[in-house]
Every structure is written in C-alpha cells, then in structure tokens.
Image: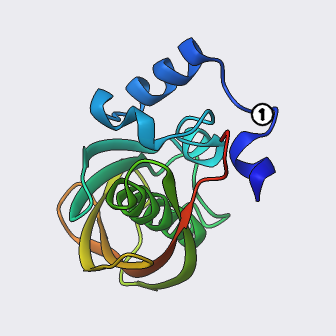
Amino acid sequence: MAGVLSGSAGLGPEEHTRDLVAHGVPAELHGSFPGHGVGGLARAMGIRFTELGPEHAVATMPVEPNTQPAGILHGGAHCVLAETLASTAATVHAGPGRYAVGVDVNATHQRSAARGTVTATCTALHLGSTLTVHEVVVTDEQGRRLSTARVTNLLRDRPAGA
C-alpha cells in the first residue's frame, strides 16, 4: 500500500499544487492529497471538484471522452466519478495523516447521457472513525438523475513519510 501513496509517480510540489488548483481543490484541503494530486484517473476523466467537504461534495465530469461504444456515458465512468468524489469527501473527514480507500461501490443507472457535462452530488450517510458511507447522485445538465451510487470507505492511517 505504501507504494500507492509514496511511489515515484508522485508530482513535484509545484506540479502538485497546479494539479489540485486545476481540479477545483480548495487550498486549505491540499494537505489531504498526497504527492499524487487528484490522481491519474480523475485527471484522465476530467473530474473537477466544485464543492468539497466531508458531509457534502460536488464534482463535474465531461461525457466525452468517457463513453462506451454506443456513444453514451460509460457505466464505469459513473462509478469512477462516484467513488472519486466519495473517497475524497471521506479523506477530508478522516483528517490529517489519514486517507480513505473504497471498499464497496453499488450503482444503479437510471438514464443515459450522450453529451455535455454530468454533475455528481455526494451526501454523507455515515461518518465514523473507521468507515464512511456516502450517497452520490449523478445528474445531467437538465438536472435529470442518471445514476445513484452508495460508496463505503475504510479510513486508514497514512504510512510514515507518505
């Protein structure tokens, strides 16, 4: 696990800060993100945080290029957005020196999207000292529900030096 948090793929200090700012992470929360910034998958998928707290968080993601062969937003992209948002909210809840890892994701897809930007709204259902549970609702630009996910995270202590 230590390699995931402190491996050579980390960003330099300036690049780390630029990455967090570019993805909407408020300066006061930069300490919650180790040297990898928002993470390669969140960067690749275009995820951007617009609100970020343990009880309520919001992020956006473009539909393109996160589509399946049928031209609609991939169901896995819904799950990546939901887990990224919930895990980040859980990490903020965990506080300095701790981080969250997803242990369960359950998603139901209600409708598809073929263009535009989707918005995920994350609401805490349980904020404990070792587990968190968040509900994440993904909507399209018209506010229609596309999917509903429940994400459970385990809170861990960050390894020394990470």
Mark 1 secondary-structure assignment = loop
Tell me the residue at 78%/33% (across/down): 9
- Name the residue furthest top: 14
Q: Which of 72 and 132 is in front in this view?
A: 132
Q: Is residue 84 left or right of residue 11?
A: left
Q: Where is residue 146 in the image (x, y as percent from the top left)?
A: 34, 73
Name the foreground residue: 12 vs 108: 12
Residue 112: image x %, image y %?
41, 72
Residue at 39% x, 64% y is 90
Q: Is residue 28 left or right of residue 100?
A: left
Q: In which quadrant of the rendered image does the C terminus lie? A: top right
- Residue, x 65% and y 18% (percent of image)? 12
The reply, left or right, for residue 23 in relation to residue 72 is: left
Tell how many labels: 1
Q: In which quarter of the image is the N terminus?
A: bottom right
Say if residue 72 shows up in the picture.
no
In terms of image quadrants, where is residue 82?
A: bottom left
Mark 1 nearby-residue class (10 Å; few <14, some 14–19, many ≥20)? few
Nearer to the camera, 114 or 14: 14
| Residue 53 visible in the shown view | yes
Q: Where is residue 28 in the image (x, y as percent from the top left)?
A: 28, 32
Going by the numbered disc 1, the residue's amino acid type is Ala
Image point 55% across, 24% down: which residue? 16
Compared to 88, does 144 lie above or below?
below
Colour treatment of the image: rainbow
> Taking 80 as reference, is 107 left or right?
left
- x and y percentages locating residue 77 in the rendered image: 55, 63
Above or below — where is 3 with respect to 19?
below
Residue corresponding to mark 1: 9
